[in-house]
Image (cartoon, grey):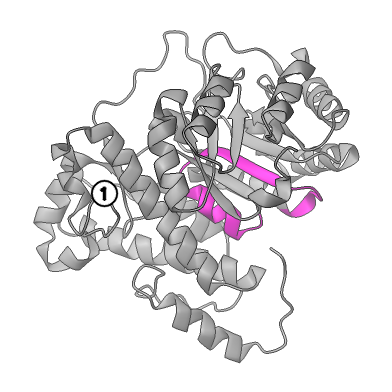
Amino acid sequence: MPQSLDQFAGHLLIQCRPSQALAAAEVAKARHTGLVITGRSSEDTVRHLRAQGFDGLVLCDADRYSGTKRIPGRRGIHPAWCRRQHDLGLAALTDSGYLEPRDWIGLRTILRAAGGHRAPVVAMLPMAARWFATSAVCDAISREINKYEVPVAFAIEHSSDPFGVQYLLRGFLHVLRKVAVPVLLLRCDISALGALCHGAHAAAIGTISALRHFYPTLARGRSPSPGLSAFVSALLSYHKLETCQRVFEETSDMAQLWTCDCPVCDGDTPGRLAEAVEAGVAVFQHSLYAQLGLHAEIFRIARTHEEYVSIWHETCSHALYVHEQVAAVTEPWRMPLNLKSWFKVTDDPLFRAIIPHQSVGDGTAAAHVSSRREDAPGREEVSGRDGP
């Protein structure tokens, strides 16, 4: 019997290439989450993982929507692909093509085909950023999704970070509020955690930049940025290892913020990961452990939808405050646009006066939420491009 979509609820998933699946599965198994395996050989990879004893949640992303040979969404999906996912015991993620702006025929083609399959099926919607430009279009997207009553998974195309664009974040959250089916968000970075806090059914963080983003197809292709980037929890963002080491050295008075207790770092700082035998694997495993740790802490503390939103807003606020402290002694320094967007586009529903020193990472968020519960009795529970 295929895995139920209900099993994915609240999960921060790991999106990886087939070649990374074993290393990613090690983290997923330790943190009780699942994988989104992206690529044409994803089915063979699932069989290999099962043979190796990994029994966690898995989705297969055919990735027919990206690259120079991507197909348009109106070409539809392959029923056999969905059937094979079910045969593997998985919920099926459709092998959809790319949805360029206002391709309503393509959107309806994907939703209609997905709705005609035996559940569980998730309609993959790889969409251009301009789909989310206006509330009117977002309302129309929501109506189409609700009409076909099929769960959906978004991947949002952008040249950098879609959630660093305020109109896009606003539009995505608008759709998230309007649809009546489970919504997944794929190919994302730490904003995946923000989406979960705002009601997404599940979301996935990529192991590498190309899987934390859905880049547009360029005529000459896109040259990857050289070097390895690691996630820094206190900054809530990815940074090159050499940048990490420089910042850590220049901010010795903030040293307590930079150490990491994940199984990879073991109390050291992420800047030392360059010395690892397999640095690329060490970097992405550390980054995943760190973000899954934040996810676990938020989901341990929060009980209601308002509390999830409040803690996420406060976590972004605290990270921006730490960025300001770093910028005061390190030049040049850029504030992450996605954190600025989350802070400006969303509000803290429980408390308007932001206290920048409170955060999930330093353990004060629990007191932060607890004090707000006392101020608001009777609330009903609601179910709920990498930096330099």
Q: Nearer the viewer, residue 36 or 124?
A: 36
Magenta segment: 177-199
Answer whether residue 185 is magenta in the image: yes
Q: Tell me the element at label 1.
A: loop
Q: Position of residue 334 (x, y in %)?
A: 30, 47
**Left or right: 27, with 308 as reference point:** left
Residue under circle 1?
Answer: 264
Is residue 207 in view from this perspective?
no
Would residue 211 be counted in the magenta stretch? no
Q: Is residue 117 above or below residue 264?
A: above
Q: Quadrant of residue 229?
A: top left
Rendered location of residue 330, percent (x, y): 16, 52
Q: Identify which residue is drawn at 73% across, 30% down.
A: 86
Give the side of residue 305 with respect to residue 255, left or right: right
Q: Quadrant of the N terminus?
A: top right
Amino acid type, mark 1: Val
**Quarter-of-image position of residue 315:** bottom left
Spot occupied by residue 46 in the image (x, y as percentages of width and height):
55, 28
312 over 284 or under it: above or below: below
Q: Is residue 98 above or below residue 344?
A: above
203 with respect to 182 (left or right): left
Residue 359 shows up from this direction: yes
Residue 9 falls left or right of residue 290: right
Quarter of the rendering occupied by the C terminus? top left
